[in-house]
Image (tube, rainbow, N blue to C red):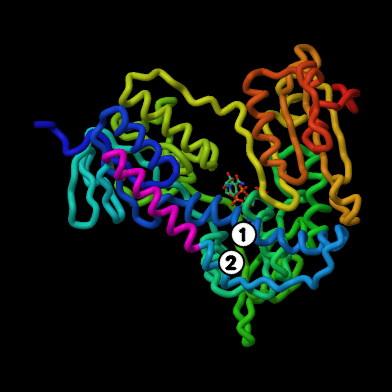
Amino acid sequence: MAAFDFDLFVLGVGSGGVRAARMSAGYGARVATAEAVHMGGTCVNVGCIPKKLYVYGAHFAADFEDARAYGWDAPIPDIDWATLKRNKDVEIKRLNGIYGGLLDQAGVTHFDGRAVLVDAHTVAIGEKRVTAEKILVATGSKPFVQDIPGKEYLSTSDDAFALETLPRRVLVLGGGYIAVEFAGIFAGLGVETTLAYRGPKLLRGFDEDIRDMMDAAVQHQGIKLSLNTTLNSVQRVASGALSAEFADGSKTEFDFILAATGRTPNSADLGLEALGVAMSDNGAIIVDQDFRTSVPHIYALGDVIDRFQLTPVAIKEAMVFAANAFAGGKQSMNYDLIATAVFCQPNVGVVGLTEKEAQDAGHKTQIFRSKFRPLKHTLTGRNEQSLMKLVVDAESDRVLGIHMIGAEAGEIIQGFAAAMTAGVTKAQLDQTVGIHPTAAEEFVTMREPVAQA
Ligand code: NDP
């Protein structure tokens, strides 16, 4: 008789939890999972997937306009939000089923409901109690909302995905991924959109050349950009609108206020504190390179450890965890070259070091840069600019960072991220024959550095 009901119990079946459960089961472990909210977690239900569908939906506005310059003479149609929302919901339901099916096929036992640890090896899901030798916490994160008067009127990205009608006037708070992506979605769908950020430039942490272009890119989409702006309070007024009061004393009315001000780990009330699982001040579970917490048989990965809140990172972490915990692996997670994209209009895609990070790390750098109007817009007249940038180590010729703002930057950067993982040098990019005419060919045709330091 086994001492425990399961070898592994996974709390949360988001991107990381599902992959860890399936891989561990594949290695022969007896695995159980539990999920309190959505099968598939944030990414599938209230994150990457519905966001990308809404980004596609919003982009048609520009496509219809641009089509005219290509001879398509038709009136610009209206968006039927209810159709987009319904089709998005249907697709997510389908994905929920696929995720459930993946667990079934792997032989994982799944429990619907919130799981909490009642002792070191016992998990309670409602009245049900099961035991497991190892526990994996993959409970993800939730939106952080500022504590200001009228906080109850602030909505989150979860609420934005659930909107049944499209608001007329939206205020988006924040200057990171979710803020610029959702501002772009709302503006594309014809909503009067204001983006208010507390700092001087959007996308803190990204390369300065990208950041310098973001303001114009955002405004070009018809978004009203308000930098160095802090929201002090919100009130509901007689008309039903939300009146936002800013630190400079100004007041503006909106119908929906989206707080896109970061996400905090979902680590509270899981029974972890009582077991002595160490956490940082923001509730991130502290783990070692095997994703082991301060309690050796309890593990954690994904957003709840707050290293990189990105689906592909959680998936990779899960694969490392499963291989090490159940297949005698000695793998470790490499966080060095994580490519990422912001699905604003146009996209931002980056991999590796920014120019400043490279210089701060002691590299002598050569910077290559190309800024241009995409070929498509030579006919449309749309004043959209693309920027492509290489940060190169002047001594070794290794490419340290690749940055792009432009159409399909996410798609383009993924391939260059593989090249960087393989250690690509600038000379090797120069040897590569371009595909003409594409934007991506710029990365293999930049000849002279624009700066050296
Ligand atoms: P981000 O960390 O990207 O941005 C948070 C923003 O909120 C920052 O601009 C920050 O300002 C601001 N902020 C934080 N606290 C406050 C406050 N108290 N008052 C006012 N402003 C505040 O978080 P997001 O919420 O946009 O996204 C969460 C995470 O989800 C991202 O970090 C990313 O990892 C992931 N994500 C990834 C996507 C993708 O891959 N395309 C898409 C969406 C999310 P400041 O810069 O000054 O700190």
Q: Type of residue at label 1?
A: Tyr
Secondary structure of the residue carrying tag 1 is helix
Residue type, numbered disc 2:
Leu
Q: Is residue 96 magenta?
A: yes
Q: Residues within 10 Å of mark 1 (few under 14, many from 20)?
A: many
Seen in the image, is 442 located left or right of residue 270? right
Q: Which residues are magenta?
A: 89-107
Q: Judge from the rendering whether residue 191 lies leftward or rightward of residue 122; answer left or right.
A: right
Q: Badge 2: how crowded within 10 Å, few (<14), some, or many (20+)?
A: some
Q: Which mark is residue 54?
A: 1
Residue 257 — which label?
none
For label 2, the SS is: helix
The residue that appears at 34% across and 38% down in the rendered structure is: 21
Q: Are marks 1 and 2 in contact (CB under 8 Å)?
A: yes
Q: CA distance from mark 1 to mark 2?
A: 8 Å
Q: Which x, y percent locates residue 387?
A: 82, 40
Closest to the observer: 281 or 141? 141
Residue 229 falls in which quadrant of the image?
bottom right
Question: Which quadrant holds residue 361?
Answer: top right
Q: Identify the residue shown where x is 70% and y is 52%.
A: 344
Any magenta on residue 260?
A: no
Which residue is situated farthest in the top direction here?
A: 395
User: What secondary structure prevails in the magenta region?
Assistant: helix
- Whole-percent x and y of residue 286? 43, 35
Relative height, residue 11 to residue 154 (above, below): above
The residue that mark 2 highlights is 84
